[in-house]
Image (tube, rainbow, N blue to C red):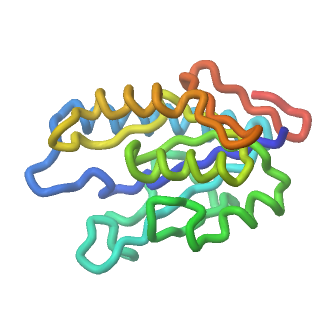
Amino acid sequence: MATALIVIDVQKNILARPGGERPVVLDRFDAVRARIAGLVDAARHADAPVIFIQHDGAQGHRLETGLPGWEICEDLGRVSSDTVVRKAACDSFYETDLQSVLARQGITHLMIVGLMTQYCVDTTCRRAVSLGYDVTLVADGHTTGDSGVFTVEQLVEHHNALLDGFSAGAATISVMPAKDVTFVHNGAAA
């Protein structure tokens, strides 16, 4: 089973909004980025592909294409050989070349991390399974902002519980913490 690490929308202004966020939201974003950087390193050691998904926001959007806030966070360990798939919807497969990128590399299993939990992470996990990919959602490798109704903690906990075991045909989502993640690709493990 060939695995790729999919890093969704970890961009500088992903959590920027009028009025700001609770400090815990921003602290959690820092901790999630650190975990993702560790997973990027582990994937590289196992020769597993790392694919960054970058949201292209319209003019005036906090992730407006080409502006500094649109950039992928530098602390993730991205290198020039990593694939970047640009999208304009919550679904990382919708009108993108992600599926063809995965097919060219023989990828059958996706390790998913990133932002925003209830939007792009959830939608991409569900779509991946419906396309036949097995998915591991890293339980502490995704985050979001408060929704106004639910806190970030509630949203992440809810989606981890909701998505664990979600399936379509033989493909399934499993949820596990970063400390339990291992990559196996081309005979190497990390």
Whole-percent x, y for residue 84 in the image: 60, 64
Assign the N terminus to one quadrant of the image.
Answer: top right
Residue displayed at 44% across by 38% down? 142
75 or 172, nearer to the observer: 172
Residue at 22% across, 33% down: 151
| On screen, residue 173 above or below 130 | above
- Figure quadrant of residue 97: bottom right
Q: Residue furthest left?
A: 19
Residue 129 visible (yes or no)? yes
Observer-nearest residue: 110 or 36? 110
Extreme residue toward the bottom, this view: 59
Identify the residue shown where x is 74% and y is 32%. Answer: 183
Residue 44 visible in the shown view = no
Q: Quadrant of the C terminus?
A: top right
- 59 vs 78, left or right, is left
Q: How many marks?
A: 0
Q: Tell me if 190 is positioned left or right of 89 in this view.
A: right
Residue lying furthest right in this view? 187
Judge whether 60 appears above or below 160 on screen: below
